[in-house]
Amino acid sequence: MSINSFGHLFRLTTWGESHGPAIGCVVDGCPPGLELDEAWVQRFLDQRRPGTSKNVSPRQEPDQVRVLSGVYEGRTTGTPIAMMVDNVDARPADYPKDAPYRPGHADFTYDAKYGLRDPRGGGRASARETAMRVAGGAVARLVIPEVEIAAAVVEIGGEADESRWEAMLDDARAAGDSFGAVVECVATGVPAGWGAPIYAKLDADLAAACMGINAVKGAEIGEGFGAARLKGSENADAIRAGAEFDSNHAGGITGGISTGQAIVIRVAFKPTSSIRIPVPSIDAAGREVEAVTKGRHDPCVGIRGAPVVEAMVALVLADHKLLHRGQRG
Amino acid sequence: MSINSFGHLFRLTTWGESHGPAIGCVVDGCPPGLELDEAWVQRFLDQRRPGTSKNVSPRQEPDQVRVLSGVYEGRTTGTPIAMMVDNVDARPADYPKDAPYRPGHADFTYDAKYGLRDPRGGGRASARETAMRVAGGAVARLVIPEVEIAAAVVEIGGEADESRWEAMLDDARAAGDSFGAVVECVATGVPAGWGAPIYAKLDADLAAACMGINAVKGAEIGEGFGAARLKGSENADAIRAGAEFDSNHAGGITGGISTGQAIVIRVAFKPTSSIRIPVPSIDAAGREVEAVTKGRHDPCVGIRGAPVVEAMVALVLADHKLLHRGQRG
Amino acid sequence: MSINSFGHLFRLTTWGESHGPAIGCVVDGCPPGLELDEAWVQRFLDQRRPGTSKNVSPRQEPDQVRVLSGVYEGRTTGTPIAMMVDNVDARPADYPKDAPYRPGHADFTYDAKYGLRDPRGGGRASARETAMRVAGGAVARLVIPEVEIAAAVVEIGGEADESRWEAMLDDARAAGDSFGAVVECVATGVPAGWGAPIYAKLDADLAAACMGINAVKGAEIGEGFGAARLKGSENADAIRAGAEFDSNHAGGITGGISTGQAIVIRVAFKPTSSIRIPVPSIDAAGREVEAVTKGRHDPCVGIRGAPVVEAMVALVLADHKLLHRGQRG
Amino acid sequence: MSINSFGHLFRLTTWGESHGPAIGCVVDGCPPGLELDEAWVQRFLDQRRPGTSKNVSPRQEPDQVRVLSGVYEGRTTGTPIAMMVDNVDARPADYPKDAPYRPGHADFTYDAKYGLRDPRGGGRASARETAMRVAGGAVARLVIPEVEIAAAVVEIGGEADESRWEAMLDDARAAGDSFGAVVECVATGVPAGWGAPIYAKLDADLAAACMGINAVKGAEIGEGFGAARLKGSENADAIRAGAEFDSNHAGGITGGISTGQAIVIRVAFKPTSSIRIPVPSIDAAGREVEAVTKGRHDPCVGIRGAPVVEAMVALVLADHKLLHRGQRG
């Protein structure tokens, strides 16, 4: 099985390879009557688009989205919303089949799993797939107008001081190296009561959503790993009349259910695997070769990760809003 | 919706409240012909049982499991395996309905979600539910005999030196306070190729499985959050002939698919929320009250978390083994 | 995979073998706050209980249900509702392992699928499993108090005249033979708008639910197969002001969505496969033998099917009510 | 919720409206390495294409399929296969918004469910959606090369004599009326053991698949409703050495699992609802009006149903093949 759908009631299915003719998605389960046009989706796609600065991949993709179904006279109809983006700058010829497995990439594991793969630019494993998560997230936001979602890079290469990042990235680019990053996402306006108590805890669904983003290797809610270092008395969020809390160590979730406070998730992006510094590897025939990335690549893939994290959080919250009102009315 | 099932093909459904008559589970999708008896499951249940040392809850529960279906003459039949444990030490009278919402617990959020709840010992939100995850995990292990899974506490209250833990826990117990912990789980023997590329990435399913355990607030694979602080050149796992790797920063997973290396996941448990130090709170009527735990409680809930993490990892890996052979044959 | 769960949001999972210690189920996704006690469930179980007349199996089972979770002080809590019935009259010794495959039963196909099976009284394939569908259906009815569901046998052995059935069944019993039957179920009070337009059409979900009942080989909505013999002008249901319809050839569903009229489904039960007339068969070793049923059995399994059809219809409608309000609010 | 996906492991998701820019689908879970090109899919699409004879809708649609992902150098890669067909003959202007609800169509129920709908040619409820089922079915066939699937109309307007159909259809066309039909589908080569014993019985999944096709109101396996009129001794399929059967009343399925015999399903299509004979109805504003179809329409929608039934059967069988080997290896 090759699970390319996500969500319980509000579901996103994505398809497409990096250098195929197009990428696309289907959003199913969307409530009817919501105002939706291509400009709304485009606005979010533009935020993650490559080629917009020296710190992101130079691939030139207009990423012009088309909405192909599920909308009539500017409103969602409740039927599936299909969206598509053509791959304009696809250069399949740039990717020879006997290229080395790029360490840290999915080249080796796709071959191990499927016995064959589309080698062009990472194929299905390319971060290009995340464009369609952003498109799906744009629709999800319409389902939860009461919620405000904002994600930002809060750490690059272990450095939290934003003013130092530009120099670090310049150095990394010059050295052909890359940096990891931490993205923090805050969702405000979520009422108390969304979530599920056991296997679809809001923490679990949010973590899974973000761990499914390319290059993500960790996720934490509220204090997260920091909570493992605290005492119970330090980590306690006192509750006051009116269900006001003195603090938010819980990151807005207890028992898998939202508390009404801001939901806070932090996501760890590993450094871009594609670097100009050679790394020993093998090719599909098992021969030892050196993997080295040519041309320009993102010196920090996490920078483009923030809009994707926002989208995944929006998708999870929209889904849980519908789940909650399904059970509670 | 109130999702109490877990898994794609190999599915665990659990039920039961802390102070109801029993807790139980159903394991569906298990291959037929596997040797299974109650003693096998009991062995794992005994590892997480409360009342076994001064550092875990003193509740006296024999946790004697009964297998009620799906096994014939000592072998699984492919039909659902129901297991049940009676709640022997249930003391419903100990739990008044007008008790304060315990900060960090699910008391407040369950009321917010459902409008009512079983207040006895945390009801469904009690860590007692994890016994059935352990039972399900015992069955999962039979599906993946090629895999060895071992989890252990690697940090308590931020301290990695094991020799200091006993004194720390004695202090916490004396002060009525508690500590968080980090549990690390290593699975060896997983062949390359298990997992799914996009929304059920092995990292994502493992993280969700562990984030669904009570008190867990973070999960990371391989270097995890550490990878966000590394350079690409430092984080690269060079590959050698025979698909041997020089290192395992990836924690055994790239592109959501296993590499054949050890799978490494680390899980952050927050400190036990039930402490003897009073915390301001409210009750169900909204009145300001002090929440204070009486009697003994776990000074570090993470200690009993290790067998639960093992079980969840076993469930995910068994599921992905079946998914993989479904698609690949 | 061995799918023992049913439903999208309101889900029933059943477990248990005919001659194991017990059978049981878990109802997940039930809204909180509904009044539920064991007497309510028992009332429906008593309707399908064996041993109550000469026309149904003589097995003596009190079928006393216990509700083990998900209910607190007489109300559902939103957490999973586990129910269990002990197998009191289990007689595993009556079922030798080298018995012939009973034609029409699942004996042969279970062995083909799983390589082994519990041979005692049909094991998991026994109609005893339907008791738990009835228990689940009793809970489902609480979710849809606006709906009235009633099923009845409308045909036995092709005969629609009720007054002839008793003599026919006496003859069949004397001859060691059996009859098939048609059960019709009518659900009134379903508002217009429940259902889904494409792959979970209300017709499709109802048909699947009923086709999953033991011995069922056909299902039809409204005119059903009769519609295939009508002209469009005869089959048209004219609509009047106030969304009143002149007729109900559609059986209350168009485009997979309820019209507000009565939902009508008819279900075909094949004749009981267990008969005293010998039928050539083989045993597990492949040897040719004669299959012949000893002792008494149901001369018409469809008679006990009506309460099961009601239960399945209730489960589907409850599920679609929750699905609908999840999407529409 | 608005469930536009179908299948457990091998999943089809469809999207698109009759008069939107395009219709499409995503096939997920397909095994890798299967030879697939557009010509293969086109071959099946051409079988159901409108405009090919006087007995099917005159809409001129080339229905030229494009495969947009999941295939590399002529072989499936295991990643999602997206397919798309442009709506060339879309005429949105032909469909005024204040048109009467067409009795038997989904016009009224879509409005009841969603509060709004795309009125152009039935929108999402148009039989045009079935083109993508046929496309998905073409891929499914590649997964089960051991199975041969053939469906045919066996009855029109209650008449089984094929030689009379042409005259009947001419009469219906002249009178502006329509006929229902029965389609029978036979799948040979399915080995014993596919299916699931309780809630995804092969009968149930096949019935649901076919009941989800537009205009279908009944489904039966083997003797189906006929079995309800037989005695047990008449309906018994004697088994001989080598698991050969004397007859196939069971339609190739017992206990929800394939027997190795031919799988036989019959499906009832109601007469085309769009007729030139006026039927009283209302419009969206609730005003009483007459619904009358202008121009030409299918006098028997079942005729184009046969390739769709084949496709749905192929999808179910491919899914159960993967499910079976997931559990059994």
Image (cartoon, coloured by chain):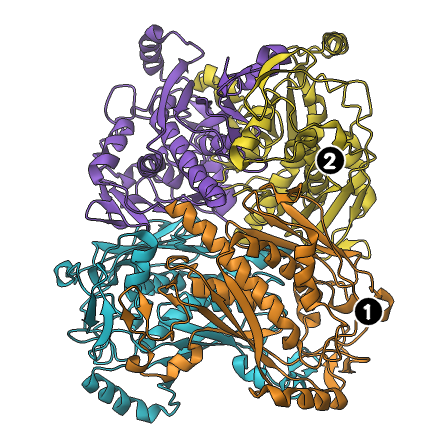
Chain colours: A purple, B yellow, C orange, D cyan
On screen, residue C33 above or below A182 = below
Is residue A97 in sight in this rendering? Answer: no
Left or right of D94, for residue B217: right
Please, what is the three-letter code of the amino acid marked with disc 1? Lys
- The residue indicated by pointer 1 is C97
Residue at image point 60% right, 23% down: B101
Left or right of A295, for residue C37: right
Q: Chain of mark 2?
A: B
Closer-to-camera residue (A236/D221): A236
On screen, residue B300 above or below D273 = above
Residue C328, percent from left and from top? 37, 47
Residue at image point 24% right, 82% down: D177
Look at the numbered disc 2 and give the secondary structure of its residue.
Answer: loop
- The residue indicated by pointer 2 is B19
Please, what is the three-letter code of the amino acid marked with disc 2? His
State the CA–CA distance, disc 2 to disc 1.
42 Å
Q: Residue furthest left?
A: D93
- Numbered disc in front, either 2 or 1: 2
Q: Are marks 2 and 1 on the same chain?
A: no
Residue at image point 62% right, 88% down: C163
Locate residue C259: give its quadrant.
bottom left
Locate residue A175: give its quadrant.
top left
Tell whether label 1 touches label 2 (CB within 8 Å).
no
Residue A133, percent from left and from top? 36, 37
Viewport quadrant of the C terminus of chain B:
bottom right
Residue B11, percent from left and from top? 61, 47
Q: Chain of mark 1?
A: C
Closer-to-camera residue (D173/D111): D111
